[in-house]
Each structure stands twice: as C-alpha cells, then as structure tokens.
Image (cartoon, rainbow, N blue to C red):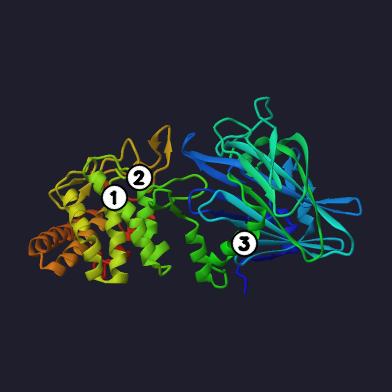
Amino acid sequence: MSYLKFDTNLMINLEQSLTKEMLRTNKSGAYSFSTIVDCNTRKYHGLLVIPMPELDGENHVLMSSLDATVIQRGAEFNLGLHKYPGDNYSPKGHKYIREYTCDYNPSTIYRVGGVILSRDVIFVSHENRLLVRYTLLEAHSPTSLRFRPFLAFRNANSLCRENAQANTSCEPIDNGIKICLYPGYPELHLQLSVKNTFTYAPDWYRNIEYMKDQEQGYDYQEDLLVPGYFDVSLKKGQSILFSAGTSPLAPNRMSHVFKAETSLRTPRTSFTNCLKNAAYQFYNKHEDGQRYIIAGYPWFTYRARDMFIALPGSTISAKDPGLFEAIMQTGEKAIRNFMAKQPLDCAITGMDKPDVLLWAIWAIQQYALFAGNEECHRLYGELVVEMLDFIRNQRHDNLFLHDNGLLYTDGLDKPVSWMDSTIYDKPIVPRSGYLVEFNALWYNALRFGAELATMTDDTYHKESYDKLATQVEASFVQVFMNRYGYLHDYVNGMPDWSVRPNQIFAVSLPYSPLDRMQM
C-alpha cells in the first residue's frame, strides 16, 4: 500500500496539486524541491539546489527544472509546466499525468495518446546529483524524448534575470555536456545513460512566475536559461536515465547508482515509515565526518536548539540510537567549546541561546529512557554534570540563577526562546524574565542529573541537585500558576497571561514541577 498516491483527477486540478510539494535531500545539505506536478511555485524550488560554503555559505539553485517532451510521428507533447504572467501556464504537461506515487522514490505516470511513460526521481546520498529515470511502458510507433534543462545558477534567496554576463557556452562530455554560467560556481554535468544528440540553442525563458512568493509580497518573476536540448530515441520497455550533477558520472554506472540508492530508501508502506523517511531527509553528514540535523529546508542551517529538540525523535524513535550517538558527538563538541568560551569548530549556530543546554540535557534524558541509565551515564554522565554546573555557577551570559532557584533571562532586545521572529531586529514577542518552559526544563534537568548521580554513588551532586530542584518546584508553582488554573507564559515583575503552548512542557517532561492535581 502506498501512503502517497494521487490520481489524475487531483493531478490535473492545479488548485489542489500546486499546494503539494515533495522535498528530497542528499543528507549533506543539497536538496531537490518542487510541486508534485513539477511546477515551481517558490524561488527556493529547484531540481538541484546545493550549499556553497566557498561562495557565501548559502543554498544555490543550479538546475531549476527539466522539461521532457514526447515526440511521436513528428508531433511534440511537452510534459513540463511553468507559470507565466496573466495566470498563463505553458506548457500544460500536467494534463498528461495519470498517477503520482512515492513508495521508494517519487514516480509519475504520463499518458500521451498511445504512449505510457513513467518518470522516477532519486537524489543521490552525499553527492550533488539528481537522477531521473524514464521508462517507455507502452508505445505503438517510434518514440523519442527531448530534454530541456532550465538553469539558474543563483542564490536560492534571489532571482535570475537575462544578462550578458552568463556564460552560455558548454563543452561536450560523455553522453552529455558540462556548463557553468558564472565564475565561482561548480560545473554542471548534464548526461544521459545512452547515446543522444545535443542541439546547442541557448535561449532565455522570460518572466517565469512563482505564485507563493507573489502571495507573500516578494519578487516573483525570473528568467531561466535553456542551453539547448537533448534528443534520444526510446523503445518500448526501455529505460534511460538523465543525470544532473556537479561531477561527471559514467553512463554505464547510472543504472547501478539508481538501483543502489533505491535499495537504501525506507518504503512508505506504513505511517511509521513515512515519518522515518521524512526524518532521514534532515540528517547531514559533512566531509569531515561531523553529523548534524538541519533545522529545516529550504531556509535554515544547523541551529543548536532545533537540533537537540529534534534529535531523539528523529533517531531513537526511528530505532537508530547509533545515529543519536554520532550526531551527539558533534553536539557535545560544540557544547564543550561553548562552555570553555572557545570557537565551536563546527557548523552549529545559536549555541549561546539560554535554553540550548537545557534542551541538550533533555535529549540525553530521552537516550537514557531508551538505552538505560548505565549506558547513558557512561557516554554522557560527565557532560550532564558539566552543563548543570555551568548553569548553576552562572557562567552563561544570559541565564541567571536567582535566589528562588528559578532561571531568569533577558529577552527584551533580542529573542531568547524558540519564539524568535523579529522585526527591525527586535523580537515581535519579547519574552523576558522567568520563562515557563525554561524553568520547567531546569527542574527536569536537575532531577535527571540527580538520577544519573546515583549510578556512581555521587552523593554530593545527587543531594545538591535534589535540594535545588525542591526549591525550584515550590517557586515554580508560586510564580507561574495563576488563579485560572493555567501557567503564565513568563513573569518579569508583572506576569504575562497569554495562553501559549510553552506551558505544555511543564506537564510533558519526565519530571514535572507540578503535581497531578495542578496538571
């Protein structure tokens, strides 16, 4: 059973199909992202989008889209889809779609008269390469395919316009071409698995529109370069592959790479597998061996808070504790360097946010619930003590332990919690003072630290953590519980009465400062 399957009725209805997007990543920062009908609706969309640390550290769209055209008896049927001014779509390839599924890979079935064609897409792990496989399932007369790559070579946050600086020349390579529009970019290698004919005919396709950007009030029109087109004949039952990558690939290896990558995928045959598959998209492994969880595609990078919050659910819940340990190695290095006030020596950002260490302790606690306290103490016991003592000894620049045992933070001029939206560099919601989730996490961290201390009969830390936690418990109820039976969001002299989800942490953590009646 496929949990992601859409029939022709939905696919040809652009009002429905254009709202559904598919994201695939290579687990090293690059991604392929578009709608299920292959019509880009955001400037962040693209078939091959790669991070470029050597240029500006941001994502860059190399290949925006790939139009395939079925040619039979001289008639052309373009399967692409682009939006132009005036709510015009051209070509209208979505009308040929009969089915879209995603078990292992995104797969689309097209029907053009007597021609039935399948298209399967895979993004190669830890490599800047997209592979698209076309299979001619049915045909009653000679059939050929024509491919037009739409190139951008731009920052994912900007848009491209026709310009004289673009280097439209290309060089022939094995079964394809290589091209680089601007200095500083890698060469893009466009190849097919079989012999083909490439016709060099550079042309700009002007004023392609991205409706989602338009809706949000951003610039939304772009010009994309098509350097030419590839023609290839296809027999019934035959499969060919199109490769787009920053390095060449031997044509006779394309099928092997495609099959090998497919075998690594988690099939979407259950809801759990769908969640696993989604989680795996956010793992990142760098060339230096360090592993991360990216905060989100297509905008974010490796943010400390997001990484520690997501770490247990995307590793332990997927029954992959080894991956937790691998990513935590990077996290531990960042934590220790931060506490020692040294450069992090990794790509993690936001380590100075005042709740990051509290979330790191919570993540380790989730590991303990899976692997047991003994194994957790062996790997992370010392780190937990160091983090708790770092906070307790008030070595954090913006986390202050008050006499009542609660933690205080200054969030008036810059956001300090996950609610970090800003306008003119100022927090939209300036949460400052005693924050409810910070202090719920603090209480939980102290109790967990005392629990781990029993593994080595560390009486000093157990008793000191328990004593402070008891004080936090009393102060928490006194400061945050209001007469209406819910918790203040934050208290800074005057309480904030806003009802926000932050109070849920106080009842969801393994150790809660509230009793059952208060919950």
Q: Is residue 43 left or right of residue 362?
A: right
Q: Which residue is mark 3?
A: 256
Q: Is residue 461 left or right of residue 489?
A: left
- Ranked by sequence position, the earlier of labels 2 and 1 is 1
Give yes or no for contact between labels 2 and 1 (Cβ–Cβ under 8 Å). Answer: yes
Please tell me how crowded label 3 is: few (under 14), some (14-19), or many (20+) other residues with Cα within 10 Å: few
Q: Position of residue 346 (x, y in %)?
A: 35, 45
State the residue at coordinates (31%, 38%). 412
The quarter holding residue 188 reads: top right
Q: Residue furthest bottom?
A: 1
Element class at badge 1: helix
State the residue at coordinates (57%, 63%). 260
Q: Is residue 504 at all visible to an observer of this figure? A: no
Q: Position of residue 301 (x, y in %)?
A: 44, 45
Please tell me how crowded label 1 is: few (under 14), some (14-19), or many (20+) other residues with Cα within 10 Å: few
Q: Position of residue 392 (x, y in %)?
A: 16, 50
Give the CA distance from mark 2 to mark 1: 8 Å
Give yes or no for contact between labels 3 and 2 (Cβ–Cβ under 8 Å). Answer: no
Q: Amino acid at mark 2?
A: Cys
Q: Nearer the viewer, residue 362 or 288?
A: 288
Q: Amino acid at mark 1?
A: Lys
* Quarter of the image that includes the C terminus: bottom left
Q: Which residue is mark 2?
A: 346
Q: Amino acid at mark 3?
A: His
The disc placed on residue 410 is none
Give yes or no for contact between labels 1 and 3 (Cβ–Cβ under 8 Å). Answer: no
Q: Position of residue 255 (x, y in %)?
A: 65, 60
- Ranked by sequence position, the earlier of labels 1 and 3 is 3
